[in-house]
Image (spheres, rainbow, N blue to C red):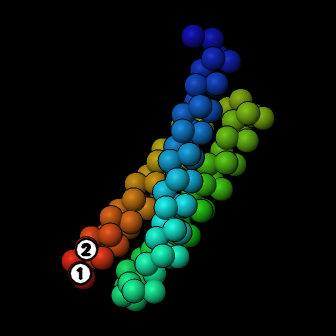
């Protein structure tokens, strides 16, 4: 595989995770708009923290993609950091959803 093909694959992978983060962010914002008024303060706070973390993660991944296109330098550590950030956000979302389910 040539260097250019490898870079294209890395960018495609980053864009894939960015898309997952955008969909999760939109879903969480939609939940906040529809059910936020009936949620407890803890659940609402966790959802807000999740939205903020996801939005920061999306911006971070976008910057990584731009740098990868411009610099052509490996960004393996930043990719790992982005995936870890996504995992942390998904844990927050899971906790919030579990707390919402138990509150009913």
Look at mark 1 in the image and give the residue it sits on.
104
- On the image, the x and y values in percent for residue 67 come to 72, 41
**Residue 69 placement: quadrant:** top right
- Count of numbered circles in the view: 2
39 sits left or right of 59 in the view: left
Q: Are marks 2 and 1 in contact (CB under 8 Å)?
A: yes
Picture layout, residue 34 above or below residue 13: below
Give the class, few, some or many, for how many residues have Cα within 10 Å of label 2's Cα (few <14, many ≥20).
few
**Residue at x-position 48% and y-position 76%:** 34
Find the residue positioned furthest to the top: 1
**Residue at x-position 53% and y-position 69%:** 29
- On the image, the x and y values in percent for residue 100 come to 30, 76
**Residue 68 placement: quadrant:** top right
Picture layout, residue 84 above or below residue 8: below
Find the residue positioned furthest to the front: 34
Look at mark 2 in the image and give the residue it sits on.
101
18 sits left or right of 71 in the view: left
Report if residue 99 is visible in the image: yes
- On the image, the x and y values in percent for residue 54 come to 53, 61
Q: In front here: 4 or 97?
A: 97
Q: In front here: 98 or 59?
A: 98
Quadrant for the C terminus in the image: bottom left
Quadrant for the N terminus in the image: top right
Give the class, few, some or many, for how many residues have Cα within 10 Å of label 1's Cα (few <14, many ≥20).
few
- On the image, the x and y values in percent for residue 85 come to 47, 56
Secondary structure under the numbered disc 2 in the rendered image? helix
**Residue at x-position 48% and y-position 66%:** 28
- Separation of marks 2 and 1 at Cα, in angstroms: 6 Å
């Amino acid at each position: 595989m040539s260097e250019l093909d490898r870079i294209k694959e890395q960018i495609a992978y980053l864009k894939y995770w960015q898309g997952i983060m955008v969909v999760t962010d939109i879903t969480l914002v939609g939940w906040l708009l529809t059910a936020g008024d009936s949620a407890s303060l803890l659940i609402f706070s966790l959802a807000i923290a999740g939205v903020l973390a996801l939005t920061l993660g999306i911006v971070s991944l976008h910057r990584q993609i731009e740098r990868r296109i411009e610099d052509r330098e490996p960004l393996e550590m930043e990719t790992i950091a982005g995936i870890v950030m996504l995992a942390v956000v998904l844990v927050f979302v899971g906790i919030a959803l579990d707390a919402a389910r138990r509150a009913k």
